[in-house]
Image (cartoon, rainbow, N blue to C red):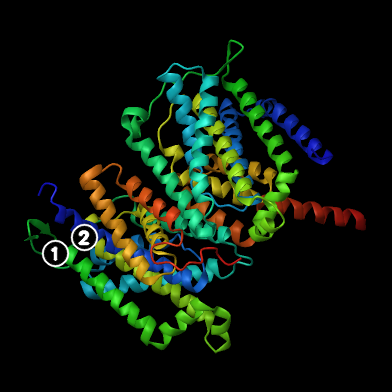
Amino acid sequence: MARMNKIHVIGFSLVIALLPFILQRWGATAYYVDVLVFVAIHSILAMGLALLIGFAGQISLGHAAFYGIGAYASGLLTTRASCSPWLAIVAGVIIAGLTAYVIGVPSLKLHGHYLAMATLGAGVIVSVVFNEAVWLTGGPSGFGEIPPLTLLGIEVNNISYYYFSWAVAIAVLILSLNIVNSRVGRALRAIRDSELAAMSSGINTSRFKLQIFVLSGIYGSIAGSLYAHFVTFINPPPFDVFFSVKLLMMVCIGGMQSIWGAIAGAALLTFLPEWLTFLQDFDILAYGVLLLVIIVFFPDGLSGLIKTFISAFRRTAINI
Amino acid sequence: MISHPLQYILTGLTIGCIYALIALGFNIIYNVTEVINFAQGEFAVWGALTMVLLIEHLKIPLVLNFFLSVSLVSFIGSLIYLVAIKPMRRPSVLTMIVVTIALSIILKGGAMFIWGKDPFALEPFTSGPPFRLFGASVLLQSLWVLGITFALVIALSLYFQKTIWGKAMSACADNPLAAGLVGIDVNKMVLASFALSAALGAIGGIIITPITLMEYDRGAMLALKGFGASVMGGLGSFYGAILAGFCLGLLESLATGYLSSSYKDGIALFILLLVLFFKPSGLLGATRVVTKE
């Protein structure tokens, strides 16, 4: 990993480690720690989607499906098969990876709008199954009593869940940054800029696209398992197509071509509903306007804005 | 009326009309701009709900009301282009998808703000009991839906082949640069394409409401099915959209009747995906699938 990245990751981990104490100082309730767990979960999802969309240039409008597969695998295997939660997470990863492979092989041959339609369709089909396979998933009313995670005999909950979920998120962050800065990352960017050019310089485009699609599916599944053991109850709505769209929003608002941006986008869109509760159901209007303004006026998202600020700051600093 | 095949086919054709109209709306904008407008389904919702509003509060008679509602939605369609699509500086397929999704969210929120969350009904265009046809019962409104769709398809194909405006629009679809060189105002044509496809969406929404009711959040599903039909027929293909719209409607209705009503959306989409995977250019699409970069 590049040195700058190392410093950023260490700094970020410190902030995350200290955040609960700072929040406590400010008199924030434990509720905010819960919201931060969701920021970690959404960050994992958004990083996977950013790798796929921002770096490989492939659209997915059905990513919530993998999130759902992870959550349902964890939930079902632990409650119905009384399987260990850790084993269930691994099983979820395998199922989601295989699903991504099966969807990816035919879909990733498609381009642009056709790929958007294929992933959207796959996402809807998975969410129809969650809703209608009542014998398995409990249908629209879902099911509960998913056991919490235990680590070395200690139950992971509240504040320890916060540290656990962020440890996973930071591991995913390091992995993603390494991918982006490696030969694979360069190959992905080449595919994004021109698949034809990438192919003619010897990059096996279909293999790379499939690998990154499966990897982002696996990220999704891990996030889903984290969700299941945290909320201990699952029903279909958090994994529907609207959530896929929300994930896309996170990636776009953060800046598509930035892993850090994905985390920023995830944080903003997780906190926004908490700040907009006074709007009640009309908060979707605020989402729509925010997304529109960012895409039309700041196509590089939050990360682009921050970069502009930093370079402007450097310029003035040199001038002084 | 138990599991009569003709009944399912008629229902499928009726709902297929709506998918076909929305798919045509997708195609008209796509042809001229290469943009897939995900707000297309919201036009149907706005058309129908505007008509409900005008009937209930202003008591405007049916025919006038129909034209007023369609014009209003068509105006909203043009406004969308001017406010959100035109200012885009470097649009890619993905950013355009996100922009139109944002627009659909705004329109949906707007509809919730104006009309609330309750479903609304419209009176059928002609009142009367359903009649029997070879053992299936046919709603009079279904005939209106089929008739209006049929008339629109003929009018549109005449428009694109015979009128100067239609030909100009087709020229823009084929090659905007060349169209501009021969003196066609490409900008105006793009604006017209948004107005036209919004109008088609509105008409689709209005004619189906007496059968299925309409509420603020229907747009997303209608857009999904319309987009599906448009892709299945081959993006940009006029007759492909109509054929695929009817196929999707029939598939859904037959799946409801013979397989499982709860899985109908899943089954219809699954077959759509199979079509995409085995014939990526759609049923009647051109062979070139790779989008221009």
A8 is higher (above) or lower (below) than B272: above
The CA distance from mark 1 to mark 2 is 10 Å
> Which chain does tag 1 point to?
B
Q: Quadrant of the C terminus of chain A?
A: bottom right
Residue in the picture at 19% in, 53% down: B8
Quadrant for the N terminus of chain A in the image: top right
Q: Is residue A151 above or below residue A234?
A: above
Nearer the N terminus, badge 1 or badge 2?
A: 1
Residue B42, visible in the rendered structure: no
Where in the figure is residue A51, as x and y percent of width and height? 64, 45
Which chain's residue wears label 2?
B
**Whole-percent x and y of residue A12?**
74, 34
Say which of A213 and B51 sits in front: A213
Label annotation for residue B140: 1
Q: Amino acid at mark 2?
A: Pro
Quarter residue A43 falls in: top right
